Every structure is written in structure tokens, then in C-alpha cells.
Image (tube, rainbow, N blue to C red):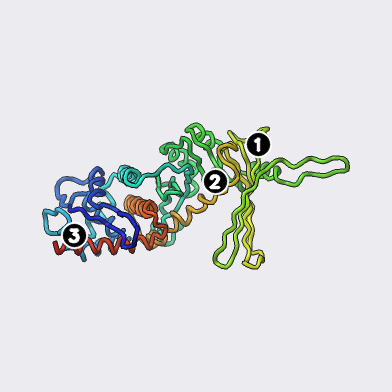
Amino acid sequence: MRSIILQSPLENTPLLIDVADLQQYLEKVPDRRHARGKIYPLSMVLTLILLAKLAGEDKPTGIASWIQERREELLACFDVVHERLPCLNTIRNILSEAIDLDELERLLRTYLHERYGGQQSQLVAFDGKTARGTIPKGMTQGVHFLAVYLPEEGVTLKQIMVEDKANEITVAPELLAAVPLKNRVVCGDAMHTQRDLSVQIMAQGGDYLWVAKGNQPTLRADIERFFQPAEHAPGWHIPPLPSTVATTVDKGHGRLETRRLTLMVDEQHFLDWPGVQQIFKLERIVTTLKGEPLRSEVVYGLTSCSPSQANAQQLLTWVRQYWGIENGLHYRRDVTLHEDATRFTNDNMTRAISILNNFIIGLAQKLGISNLALARRMFDASIARQLVYFADF
């Protein structure tokens, strides 16, 4: 294909993406189709799908329409033997059956790393998400994913399908075993605060950062006891344990949100948990701009990070980054990329679309564009300019 260079219309914004270079990467994806009846190279179809998605199309019908509506321009760009382009059925069949999804995920992740750098961030978050578009009518369960994600970079390292959210605990060890954790800090939600998983993470050379809630009532109570006021009696006083505090205050949407993390070192190893070095209390207080209380929450947690590895401010930053997975990954996939509104009847297609969506999210963040909807409008405009150029060439 001819080299399509997508550039931003904004000043001082660098090159976005070389589509021909991306297609060369995609040529490495194993093609599971039979040779008989094969018309289009797999890399070409995947590139067309990604172009349509970058331009704002998410459902297979919309992707197919986008391709057909730009038939002449796209034929001028791609080396096509037959004067036609993939139709809806071809797109569905390829997404459902033709792709080695593990290899597609690996290659797209490698592409982001080699072309745009990164994957050096320390925090690794893993979290589950249900693809609501896969829930059959009248049912409550659909395809559920557990993903490992780099919040600072917007890159999904790996994701696997699980039967439902309750099965996350059983598949989490398998998922983390497939990801390099050396010198990284792993953070997950409360259901993953498990002894065996803590041991595994440390054995892989990483550290954990957990919160303790109702699924670990004894652990939560033990940590909470450290932060209770010292008892007083006539002639007898226990000095408070040494602690450090980090605080952030955010203003927005007519309210103030204060987060205060109080950190203690478990020097005497009072807490019965593998590898624990520090424990913390995190308070979240939301008020109006006038100081009227709206809501508050207290969360207790623990980490295997030593004081030299992470102080109170660093832990607060990591916890906030983990909470950001909802907006950074889930919301973008569900709302901006319309996963929830797209009906899927095939698990492979569901996973294929989710891998492509993860790539688009990571690409936009690598390019420094935090607003994914804006990024897609920029891509759409750039693609349109390039196609017009080649059509007139």
C-alpha cells in the first residue's frame, strides 16, 4: 500500500501514525483462513478496520459502510488485485474466525512500545470488565474480561476472558504470570487481596498494593486498629505510632474532593500477611465549595513496598491512578468506543474488537491526547485529507 501519514491539524503536534508501517506489523498476524476463497490479505482487512475505527466507526456495520463509501480512494491506496473491498460478511468472518488473537494483541502492544516508547511505568493495574453487548436478552451474564493495564501510559499489556466476575480470583494468577512484574507494583480491587497472589507477585520480582475490605474482615480490622486513637488512663499513656500524611484537593463540578493518606511502617511485623511492609488509611471527603459535606469514605490498605520504595505521596498517586482505570479504560471502551452498545454473538469477535479498542486507547494516550473523542475526530480529518490526496494523485 501507499504510505498514509496521519498528521494532526493542530499546531506543534507531531506525526501521528504511519499506516503503511502499521500494516507491515499486522502482516505478522497468523491467518487462520483456508487458502481457497481468500481474496484479501488479512493485514489489509485489519488495517481497514482500524482506519474505520480511528475515524469513529465501531460497529461492524458502520465499519463496512465506511469502507464501501470510500471505495475509490481506498483502492487507490491499497494494492488490490480485485477492484473491490471487504464487505460486512468478510469483516465479521475475519473478526470471528481468522485471527490469532493472542498474537494480534502482542503485536499491537509491541508496535506501541517500539514506535512510541514506554512500558516503563511502575504501576500495573488489573481489573475486570463485562462486555454488556454480549449479555443475552433476559440474562445477566455476558463475556467478562480481566485485563492488566498501565494507567500512566494507557496501554493494556494483556487481557483474558473469564466466565464471570466471580472467576477473576481463579484466573488472576494465570494472567499475572504472563506479564513481567519485576520492579513493578501491582494494584487490584479488594477481591484480589489474597495471600497466594501476594506471594506470587513478590516471587515474580514485584510488589503489591492492596485495599482490605469486607472479603478480608480480619485483615481490615487489624489494619484499622493501628489507626485508632491511643487509649488513655490516669498515669498511663501510649504514644501514637509514627506516621506520615499526604493530601490532595481537587476542585470540579461544584465540589471539593479531599484525599488524605496516612501511612505507617509495620516495623515489628505485627500484621499477619506475607511480605507486608507498610499499611495505610485513605480518607476521601467530598464537600460543596462552601464546605458542606456530601459524602465520605475510609479505606484501609497494605503494601509490600518499603519506605524507601514508596512514601505516602507515592502511594496516594498510585491509588488514584488505579481508580482512574474506570475513566481511562472502561469508560472509553464502553462509551466512547461504544462497546456496551454493540451487540456481539461470537466470543472471538468480542475479544477481537476489545483488543482493537485497547490499541486505539493506547495510541491516543501515547500521542498525548487525553480526550479520545477529540483524537478520533483528528484521525477522521487526517484520514479524509490523505484519501482525497491519493484519489487525485
- Is disc 3 surrounded by few (<14), some (14 to 19) or many (20+) residues within 10 Å? many
Per the image, label 1 sits on a secondary structure element best described as loop
Front position among marks 3 and 2? 3
| Residue at screen point 60% across, 36% down | 276
Q: Amino acid at mark 3?
A: Leu
Location of residue 64 with respect to 38 vertically, above or below: below
Front position among marks 1 and 2? 1
Location of residue 134 with respect to 157 vertically, above or below: below
Say which residue label 3 marks: 74
| Residue at screen point 52% across, 52% down | 323
Q: Quadrant of residue 278?
A: top right
Which percent across, then down, holds residue 141? Answer: 44, 55
Q: Amino acid at mark 2?
A: Met
Q: How many angstroms separate mark 1 from mark 2 (CA)?
A: 23 Å
Location of residue 309 with respect to 373 vertically, above or below: above
Which tag, 3 or 2, sits closer to the chain's start? 3
Q: Nearer the viewer, residue 372 or 274?
A: 372
* Residue 350 visible here: no
Report how many numbered discs are placed on residues in the image: 3
Which percent across, then down, holds residue 171? Answer: 45, 41
Location of residue 186 with respect to 296 vertically, above or below: above
Viewed as shown, does residue 385 lie left or right of 373? Answer: left
Viewed as shown, does residue 246 lie left or right of 49? Answer: right
Q: Amino acid at mark 1?
A: Asp
Viewed as shown, does residue 114 lie left or right of 20? Answer: right
- Is disc 1 surrounded by few (<14), some (14 to 19) or many (20+) residues within 10 Å? some
Q: How many angstroms separate mark 1 from mark 3 (CA)?
A: 63 Å
Say which residue label 2 marks: 191
Which percent across, then down, holds residue 180? Answer: 42, 37
Check residue 266 in the rendering and tell me which mark sits there, or answer none.
Answer: 1
